[in-house]
């Protein structure tokens, strides 16, 4: 097997694409039109989880949707590749759960490792699948539902009518400019702020945090690292390291600093004095399995970093003719850096807002105000959960708390059950930092 960054993930991908050992099937990406469409009802910009989910749901309900991305799929996305129950639930709602479950590496526990080396294995329904594969499956599902794919096209700016309402987008393919007119645009362009800024939606240019990862093959460790592992340590204070087992004896190993950009009073962020590569190297020094993976394993690519936009902050959520979904709207959790599930959910929220009123003669129903209100209400309903994750992210600044929680979880089945409920989204992690939560932690 060649030592390419994506050799293991790509092997999985080939099965998805029907080019390896599965039966041949129509390839919606190969069938994508070579000439770009010029108009549609809804233009979805960004084909990550948020954009693909939105496009799929709209297309499945008969809406004329165009899904654009600056990249041709399959494409890599810097991520930990961990799928937690909120992602599983959204993938079920999209009808792709079984297809993905045949591809991902399932895990039954999340392992929390504290500074003293103690750990607890918290039960949870989780899995790992490289984003190159996951996102490709989602794009194909959107195409199968009827969304037109137009890639590679980069969003440059919104088209506006005389009243300033968004009426489509100006895009670029290389140096060539192309315009697509649309009744509505959904911006799902992830954590990079350029498209948000061009659309007049960016309130904070800097991200909330940063993280980086690489892939390493080490079949010898596959039997012992079977959980999603999170590691806290004073030497990587403010963040954490992780090792997630992918299919095929490959591991996604990385480190994140979700609060790297401290907020100033002005609301703007400024990066703290953090060298993320040093942060990662320190993680490998303090955690023996990470050191072994990096020193003994076969590296399948460079360390790649990427920004995070968390806590539903940093961007406006709508303007007339345009909705913002996914990480562009800040839909990643501050504590854990997980965001695939909530990106999918917010893509579906945007689609449902557009579908709420009956369509008439090929036109989406409902006023701008109604559609915007529904979308924003959907995001607002998620906000309390994000706020608790923001609060819980203080654990990253107090690694000793991880030791305490791990010690107590191993002693008390009720504490363990609470932690499992956090993973299953039946309990918020904020309880940990409340007075009552602390009391329960010490007494339950
Ligand atoms: C290192 C790291 C580790 C992470 N680990 C995890 C994890 O284990 N589990 C988890 O749940 N979450 C994780 N996350 C968070 C997760 O990656 C995001 O929450 C998720 O990708 C957000 O999905 P999205 O669809 O909103 O955006 P994205 O997945 O970023 O997709 C946005 C799409 O928009 C396209 N785009 C951007 N700009 C333009 C433009 N101008 N024109 C056209 N297209 C454009 C991009 O090419 C991209 O395809 C991690 C993040 C990082 C950085």
Image: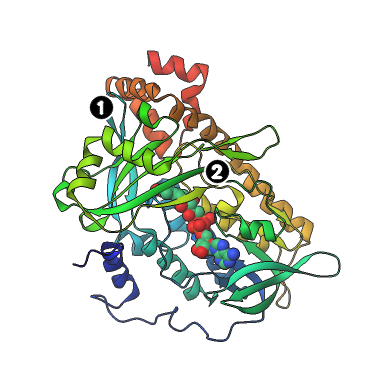
Say which mark, if any, is on residue 45.
none
In depth, the one of 148 and 23 nearer the eye is: 148
Could you tell me residue 336's position as x and y percent?
44, 39
Between disc 2 and disc 1, whose residue precedes?
A: 1
Q: Is residue 189 left or right of residue 287?
A: right
Q: Is residue 44 left or right of residue 137?
A: right
Could you tell me residue 214's position as x and y percent?
33, 52
Residue 232, compared with residue 328, is above or below; it is above
Real-space CA distance between mark 2 and mark 1, rounded to the nearest whole angstrom: 29 Å
The 10 Å Cα crowd at callout 2, few under 14, some 14 to 19, many 20 or more, is many
The residue shown at (39%, 14%) is: 442
Report the quarter where the N terminus lies: bottom left
Residue 399, compared with residue 354, is above or below; it is above
The 10 Å Cα crowd at callout 1, few under 14, some 14 to 19, many 20 or more, is some
Q: Is residue 434 left or right of residue 412?
A: right
Q: Is residue 378 visible?
A: yes
Could you tell me residue 190's position as x and y percent?
55, 56
Q: Is residue 45 visible?
A: no
Could you tell me residue 212's position as x and y percent?
40, 48
Report the quarter where the C terminus lies: top left
Disc 1 is placed on an element classified as loop
Give the residue number, with chain letter if any, for mark 2: 310
* Residue 186 occupies quadrant: bottom right
In depth, the one of 262 and 95 nearer the eye is: 262
The residue shown at (60%, 78%) is: 175
In depth, the one of 350 and 414 nearer the eye is: 350
The residue shown at (47%, 58%) is: 93
Give the residue number, with chain letter if any, for mark 1: 117
Kindly indicate whether the residue at mark 1 contacts the one at mark 2 (C-beta within 8 angstroms): no
Disc 2 is placed on an element classified as loop
């Amino acid at each position: 097997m060649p030592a390419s960054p994506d050799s293991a993930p790509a092997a999985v991908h080939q099965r998805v694409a029907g080019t390896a050992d599965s039966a041949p099937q129509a390839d919606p990406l190969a069938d994508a039109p070579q000439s770009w469409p010029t108009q549609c009802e809804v233009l979805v910009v960004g084909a990550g989880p948020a954009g693909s989910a939105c496009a799929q749901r709209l297309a499945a309900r008969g809406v004329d949707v165009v899904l654009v991305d600056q990249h041709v799929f399959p494409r890599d996305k810097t991520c930990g590749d961990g799928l937690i129950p909120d992602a599983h639930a959204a993938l079920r709602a999209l009808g792709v759960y079984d297809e993905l479950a045949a591809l991902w590496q399932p895990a039954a526990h999340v392992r929390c490792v504290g500074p003293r080396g103690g750990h607890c294995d918290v039960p949870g329904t989780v899995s790992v699948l490289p984003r190159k594969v996951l996102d490709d499956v989602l794009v194909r599902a959107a195409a199968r539902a009827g969304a037109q794919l137009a890639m590679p096209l980069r969003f440059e700016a919104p088209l506006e009518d005389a009243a300033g309402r968004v009426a489509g987008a100006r895009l670029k393919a290389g140096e060539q400019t192309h315009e697509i007119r649309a009744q509505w645009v959904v911006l799902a362009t992830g954590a990079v702020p350029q498209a948000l800024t061009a659309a007049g939606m960016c309130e904070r240019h800097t991200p909330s945090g940063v993280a980086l990862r690489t892939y390493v093959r080490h079949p010898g460790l596959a039997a012992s690292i079977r959980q999603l592992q999170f590691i806290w340590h004073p030497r990587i204070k403010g963040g954490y390291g992780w090792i997630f087992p992918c299919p095929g004896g490959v591991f996604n190993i990385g480190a994140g600093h979700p609060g790297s950009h401290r907020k100033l009073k002005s609301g703007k962020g400024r990066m703290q004095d953090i060298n993320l590569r040093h942060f990662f190297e320190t993680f490998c020094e303090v955690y023996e399995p990470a050191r072994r993976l990096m020193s003994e394993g076969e590296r399948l690519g460079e360390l790649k970093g990427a920004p995070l936009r968390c806590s539903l902050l940093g961007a406006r959520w709508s303007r007339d003719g345009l909705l913002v979904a996914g990480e562009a709207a800040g839909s990643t959790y501050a504590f854990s850096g997980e965001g695939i599930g909530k990106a999918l959910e917010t893509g579906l929220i945007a689609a449902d807002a557009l579908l709420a009123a009956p369509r008439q003669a090929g036109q989406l129903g409902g006023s701008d105000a109604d559609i915007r209100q529904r979308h924003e209400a959907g995001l607002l309903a998620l906000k309390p959960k994000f706020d608790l994750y923001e609060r819980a992210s203080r654990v990253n600044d107090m690694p000793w708390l991880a030791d305490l929680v791990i010690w107590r979880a191993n002693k008390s089945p009720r504490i363990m059950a609470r932690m499992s409920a956090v993973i299953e989204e039946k309990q918020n992690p904020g309880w940990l930092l409340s007075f009552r939560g602390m009391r329960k932690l010490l007494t339950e």
